[in-house]
Image: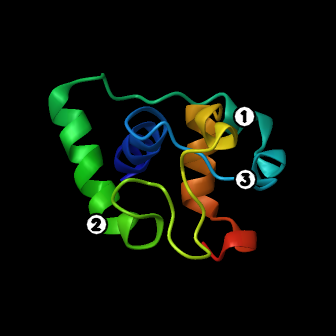
Amino acid sequence: MRSAVVLAAALALSSFAAGASSNWRAHVPGKEQELTDPLPQSADNAAAGQELYRRNCSGCHGADAAGRGHKPSLRSSHVRSASDGDLFWLLRNGSLAHGM
């Protein structure tokens, strides 16, 4: 399951050039920030990540990750510059400021 979450995080970072503005990254512990995606970059892994995004994220953030209503876009520089570990932490812990 951890690999699936890391894959989804990597997808959010790379495939969608993701980004949302909040201060969630300030709460990520140092050891979490250092995590890297354990899965190799491949077409199969990217397709699996796209499917995870479609099932779990697109309902709020949109198919294009541009956000919907009060749900933030995942295209901001704040998320785009996040590490794999930052994104993994956010997906595991959510961002209460944004209702996730």
Q: Which sits earlier in the primary sequence, circle 1 or circle 3?
A: 3
Image-based side of 32 in relation to 63, left or right? right
The residue that appears at 77% across and 56% down in the rendered structure is 22
Closer to the eye: label 2 or 3: 3
Closer to the eye: label 1 or 2: 2
The percent coordinates of residue 70 (x first, y second) are: 62, 75
* Residue ID for mark 1: 31
* Residue ID for mark 2: 55
Dot 1 falls on a residue whose secondary structure is: helix
Relative to 58, does residue 18 appear above or below in the rendering? above
The percent coordinates of residue 93 (x first, y second) are: 63, 62
Q: Which sits earlier in the primary sequence, circle 1 or circle 2?
A: 1
Relative to 48, does residue 98 appear above or below in the rendering? below
Say which of 40 and 67 sits in front.
67
Q: Which sits earlier in the primary sequence, circle 2 or circle 3?
A: 3
- Give the residue type that dot 1 points to: Lys
The residue that appears at 76% across and 54% down in the rendered structure is 24
What is the distance, in whole Å, between disc 1 and disc 2 at their CAs? 29 Å
